[in-house]
Image: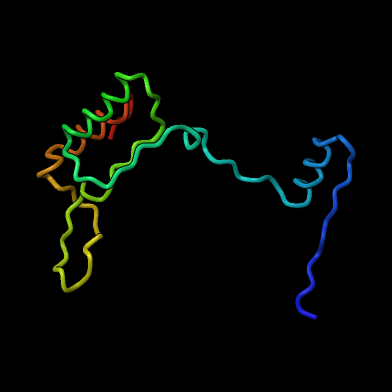
Amino acid sequence: KGAHGMVYVFVHGHDFKAAIADFYRLTGPQPVVPRFALGNWWSRYHPYSAGEYTGLLDTFADHHVPLAVAVLDMDWHLVDLPADQGPGWTGFTWNRDLFPDPSDSLATCTPGASP
């Protein structure tokens, strides 16, 4: 009773490459996470200012800690809804009190990138 599914069994002895090739022939190629996603990440819910965040990234560099992803959490943008209408996590308007020059901040945080 109930739903019946299909079961596929790949038998290739020790020829693992052939087993994977047959699996891909059945399912198609599998997506792979980008290489940077496998590195060190930094994320902290904290109202960083531009200077604090740049200082944090400099600290990682000074201690030779590679950092693949730096997540700037929610306080970089304004919360512009009245409290009775919800938490206000909307929009993409920079909080200029914390980040007076967002383009400069992004360029500083991303070596070689341009905003």
Residue 41, compared with residue 80, is above or below; it is: above
Point 24% across, 28% down: residue: 108
Farthest bottom residue in view: 1
Residue 80, compared with residue 111, is above or below; it is: below
Q: Is residue 38 left or right of residue 54?
A: right
Q: Report x, y in % for residue 57.
A: 28, 28
Residue 20, compared with residue 80, is above or below; it is: above
Farthest front residue in view: 63
Q: Is residue 103 left or right of residue 110?
A: left
Q: Report x, y in % for residue 36.
A: 47, 33
- Most foreground residue, 65 or 23: 65
Q: Report x, y in % for residue 16.
A: 81, 36
Q: Report x, y in % for residue 42.
A: 35, 37
Point 85% across, 48% down: residue: 10
- The quadrant in which the C terminus is found is top left
Residue 29, compared with residue 89, is above or below; it is: above
Q: How many marks?
A: 0
Q: Quadrant of the rendered structure where residue 18 is?
A: top right
- The quadrant in which the N terminus is found is bottom right
Point 33% across, 24% down: residue: 112
- Most foreground residue, 77 or 71: 71
- Most foreground residue, 42 or 105: 42
The colour scheme used here is rainbow
Q: Is residue 38 left or right of residue 113?
A: right
